[in-house]
Image (tube, grey):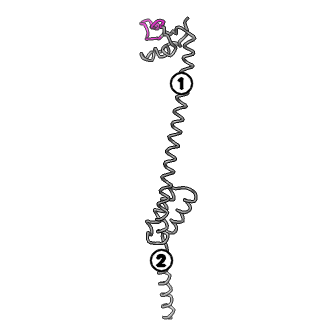
């Protein structure tokens, strides 16, 4: 019986010793490799950094450290490409907005050219008897000036009309 206990203790010691030699970085290296194959550079860099941190002296830790350099280069290239794509999209959106504004101005200029004089009447308050107090008819050379007449004073104006 003493022999069986001794054999069991030796077997348990061997299992503990062999278990202690496991490569702690292997699961993180596997995650790094999978993320790299999926071209998920952020996750790949993170997983390889984790593998190196877990066990830098193990075979997996050293392999992760070797991969880390190339992964960081790929990540930097992806971030640069993303930034360039974003800048290009913003420039295209601005160009489109500018073109729309120019087309709107051209349409407004064409509308203004149809008429020599644009008029409106703005309400500036009420008389003591309750009737409206107005500016009287105001005349402008362009429709856009006419439409902005009340805005500077903060008063409501009638829609602008062509007055030839």
What's the CA distance linking mark 1 and mark 2? 72 Å
Residue 97 falls inside the magenta stretch: no
**Dot placed on the residue nearer the N-terminal end, 1 or 2:** 2
Image vertical order of residue 7 relative to residue 45, above or below? below
Tag 1–tag 2 contact (CB < 8 Å): no
Which of 152 and 31 lies nearest the eye of the viewer?
31
Check disc 1 and report the residue beneath it. Answer: 102
Residue visible at 47% across and 16% down? 148
- Crowding around mark 2 (Cα neighbors within 10 Å: few <14, some 14 to 19, many 20+) is few
Disc 1 versus disc 2: nearer the observer:
1
Question: Please, what is the dominant secondary structure of the magenta stretch?
Answer: strand
Q: Where does the magenta region start and end?
A: 122-138
Residue visible at 55% across and 31% down? 96
Check disc 2 and report the residue beneath it. Answer: 21
Residue visible at 54% across and 65% down? 30
Label 2: element kind = loop
């Amino acid at each position: 019986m003493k022999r069986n206990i001794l054999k069991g203790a030796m077997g348990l010691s061997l299992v503990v010793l062999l278990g202690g030699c496991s490569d702690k970085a292997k699961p993180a290296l596997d995650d790094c490799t999978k993320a790299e194959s999926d071209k998920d550079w952020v996750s790949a860099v993170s997983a390889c950094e984790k593998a190196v941190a877990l066990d830098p002296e193990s075979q997996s830790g050293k392999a992760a450290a070797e991969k880390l350099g190339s992964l960081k280069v790929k990540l930097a290239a992806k971030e640069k490409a993303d930034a360039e794509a974003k800048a290009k999209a913003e420039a295209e959106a601005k160009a489109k907005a500018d073109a729309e504004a120019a087309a709107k101005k051209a349409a407004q200029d064409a509308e203004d050219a149809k008429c020599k004089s644009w008029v409106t009447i703005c309400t500036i308050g009420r008389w003591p008897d309750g009737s409206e107090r107005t500016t009287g008819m105001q005349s402008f050379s362009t429709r856009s000036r006419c439409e902005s007449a009340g805005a500077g004073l903060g008063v409501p104006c009638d829609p602008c009309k062509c007055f030839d």
